[in-house]
Image (cartoon, rainbow, N blue to C red):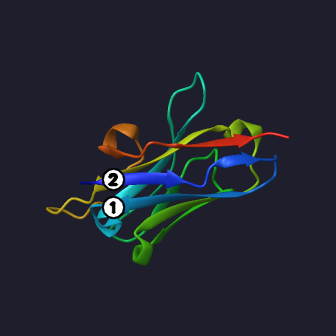
């Protein structure tokens, strides 16, 4: 059974850092594109970053470019989201999601949109506050 579990959320002061983990079970993350999303209270879910399964190419939304870094550890079957220079506006529930890489063609890059991802974790809360 395919399962994604996020961890690493918590309370952090503005300017601080957190690293979120997305651990997979039941499948190999190397064959999947992984996306990170977040949803703040009263707001739509927002795409932040993704990493391709084929070549580890990455994408970052403008809101996190230069502050967040996505990475993959194949040995641990885990994808990370390193978050630096956190702001109160970063407060949200953070989700990871997985989309299998196509087998009949080579996808360029990683998918950036919610509807691209059929598999989701349960989310982890990040609160940025003094």
Q: Residue at x 40, y 69 (%)?
A: 77
Q: What element carries label 2?
A: strand
Q: Residue at x 62, y 49 (%)?
A: 9
| Whole-percent x, y for residue 15 in the image | 81, 51
* Label drawn at residue 25: 1
The residue lying furthest to the top in this view is: 42
* Label drawn at residue 98: none
Residue 45 sits above or below residue 120 on the image: above
In depth, the one of 25 and 66 nearer the eye is 25
Q: What element carries label 1?
A: strand
Name the quadrant containing residue 110: bottom left
Residue 14 sits above or below residue 68 on the image: above
Residue holding disc 2: 3
Instruction: State the quadrant of the N terminus.
Output: bottom left
Name the quadrant containing residue 30: bottom left
| Whole-percent x, y for residue 116 in the image | 32, 43
The residue lying furthest to the right in this view is: 130
Q: Please tell me which of labels 2 and 1 falls first in the chain.
A: 2
Residue 76 sits above or below residue 58 on the image: below
The residue lying furthest to the left in this view is: 104
| Whole-percent x, y for residue 65 in the image | 63, 54
Q: In this view, does 74 lie to the left or right of 41?
A: left
- Whether pointer 2 and pointer 1 mark residues with C-beta atoms closer than 8 Å, the reply is yes
| Whole-percent x, y for residue 14 in the image | 81, 46
Q: In this view, does 112 lie to the left or right of 81?
A: left
């Amino acid at each position: 059974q395919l399962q994604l579990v996020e961890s690493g959320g918590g309370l952090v002061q503005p300017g601080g850092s957190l690293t979120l983990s997305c651990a997979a079970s039941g499948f190999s993350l190397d064959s999947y594109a992984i996306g990170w999303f977040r949803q703040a209270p009263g707001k739509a879910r927002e795409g932040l970053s993704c990493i391709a399964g084929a070549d580890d190419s990455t994408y970052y939304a403008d809101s996190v470019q230069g502050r967040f870094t996505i990475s993959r550890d194949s040995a641990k079957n885990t994808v990370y989201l390193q978050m630096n220079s956190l702001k109160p506006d970063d407060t949200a529930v953070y989700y990871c999601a997985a989309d299998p890489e196509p087998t009949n063609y080579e996808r360029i890059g990683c998918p950036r949109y919610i509807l691209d991802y059929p598999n989701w974790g349960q989310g982890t809360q990040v609160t940025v506050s003094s």
